[in-house]
Structures are given as C-alpha cells and as structure tokens.
Amino acid sequence: MRLVFMGTPDFAVPALSALTEAGHEIAAVYTQPPRPAGRGRKARPSSVHLRAEELGLSVRHPVSLKDAEAQAEFAELQPDVAVVAAYGLILPQPVLEAPRHGCLNIHASLLPRWRGAAPIHRAIMAGDNETGVCIMQMDEGLDTGPVLICKRTAITPEDTTAALHDRLSRMGADLIVTTLERLDELEPRAQPQEGITYARKIDKAETRIDWRRPADDVDRHIRGLSPFPGAWCMIGDERVKLLRSRPARGKAAPGEVLKGFTVACGENAVEILEAQRPGKLALSAEEFLRGKALPERLR
C-alpha cells in the first residue's frame, strides 16, 4: 500500500521500520519539527525524523496542518492510508479524509480506557492489571474513533513506564502490519460508552512523592513516572529521582528510612531499587548508597 506515516517519539520508530520492512511504499513521513535539546539547546530532529532519514524516506515537519496549503500538500501524496503513532499534532478533517482508507492510529491502551496523552503512565499509576494496543480509525474526537483490532498484555509488578513503553511499541509495530494485511476483512467497532477514562498529560506538580500514601500507591507512582518525568523526593538538600521500587514490609513515620533504601509510607514501606541524582547516571540502590548514608527521613 501507499502510506503516509505520521509520528514523532521513540514509540513510533518500530512501526515505521516494520511498515518499511513489510514492503509498503512510504510516500512521506510527517513528524514534529526539530526542538531545542541538550545543554547547548541545539535543534534536534525527532526520533522518527532520524529513522526516516536512515531509511531514505522523505520527511516533512510542518508546524501545523490547519492551513489549506499544508492540507493540499498532504492530499497530493494520494495515500491509500495514513498511519499515525504519537504524532503530536491534531489532524483536521480534510487530512483525516484525504487517504482512501482514512487515518489509522496506533494507541497504547485498551480503548476506551485511557484516551489521551499519557496512557502508559496512567495505566501503571492506576494499578491496572493489563493494557494493550488498539488500532483505531481516527475521527475528529480525542481517541474516540472505531477500533479495528486490539492486542493485550499484562502489567507486571516490576513494569516501569519505560519497560511497558518498549513492549507496547513493538506490539504496535506488529499489529499495524497485521491490520494492513487484513484491512479489507476487519470490521470497525464503535467504542463502548462504558469505561471511558482520560490519560491527561503528566503535570510536574504531581511528580513529587508523597510518603503519606500507602506503599502500593507510592510504588506505582515511582514506576509509572520512570524514567520520565521521574518521581522525586528530597534526600538532604538534593532532589533525587527514584526510578524503580517494590513494596516492602515495615512501619514508621512516613518518609523515615528503615534500613538500606527502604522507606516507610502511610501504610507499609517501599524498597527503592534504582535512583538518580541531579545530572548523574541512574544507579542501583547498592551503588547509590555506597559511601553515603541516607538521612533519617526523606522529604
């Protein structure tokens, strides 16, 4: 098929690679414009942009698709279908209608649960037992279109957002290839009205750890925000990100260090397995504690 691929971050890269390997013609790749990044704040192309260049594909990065010129340029590509994966721009109706088979979105949740910007983070933080990937026919709503196909995966007690992200990204790549192979036989199913939840973007204000919460909540908070933006607490005068954890037994005032890197919560305790000081590499708990004792209480 003749495709337009629309995506930006790491999550979308396996899908672009898989579609190319499957022999589809990629007429163009749309991605977000290069953004300032790093200490020098130099403009850095997106992960999809870099992969598309490696594959020798044409790359476009309009700031918006709202103007008539951008929409006409998209329509001139005459795609059979557009594949969208974490693109980051709203697709106006003329863009949605331009491909012969419309626009298909790779969404990292079991719709209608966790529509929106941060479905992986929110699924872990909410304590969901499973999640998955849905291929959805896009409409003008926020992840409201009919679903063509889904694949499920369990969320384990060890999963961080990073681990689940990578697993769902690979699943999405496989599923979109399957979807295009079976496109003529798949029947779009309207999403049910029951069970709708919204995965709002992670706000910086919710990243600080509240040790007064039960240990299970604190553990999910840490794993759900790992590695980005990162759940954090104050250790002495340092703002430290905590990246991996597991519930543990123990009882003391919230934030009190019990032993090693085990910290009391409102109920029970959490053992920290990985942490990161500002500007430093992430370290295992053992490496983090080497040569430096923790204060009696974390804030």
Image (cartoon, rainbow, N blue to C red):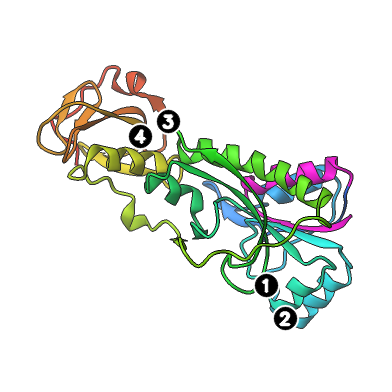
Q: Disc 4 vs disc 2: Cβ atoms closer than 8 Å? A: no
Residue under circle 3? 158
Cα–Cα span, label 4 and label 3: 22 Å
Q: Is residue 57 left or right of residue 250?
A: right
Q: Secondary structure at mark 3?
A: loop
Kindly identify which numbered label has been placed on residue 67. Answer: 2
Which quadrant, please, contains the C terminus? top left
Which is nearer the eye, 49 or 246? Answer: 246
Q: Secondary structure at mark 2?
A: loop
Query: Is residue 284 inside the magenta stretch?
Result: no
Farthest residue in the left direction? Answer: 253
Q: Position of residue 186 (x, y in %)?
A: 76, 56
Q: Could you tell me if residue 255 is visible in this image?
A: yes
Q: Disc 2 vs disc 1: Cβ atoms closer than 8 Å? A: yes
Cα–Cα span, label 3 and label 2: 45 Å
N-term-proximal mark, 3 vs 2: 2
Residue under circle 4? 277
N-term-proximal mark, 1 vs 3: 1
- Residue at position x 83%, y 77% from top? 72
Residue under circle 1? 64
Q: Position of residue 66 (x, y in %)?
A: 69, 78
Q: Position of residue 109 (x, y in %)?
A: 54, 51
Label 2: few (<14), some or many (≥20) within 10 Å? few
Q: Could you tell me if residue 225 is visible in this image?
A: no
Which quadrant, please, contains the N terminus? bottom right
Q: Amino acid at mark 1?
A: Ser
Tell me which segment is drawn in magenta: 1-23
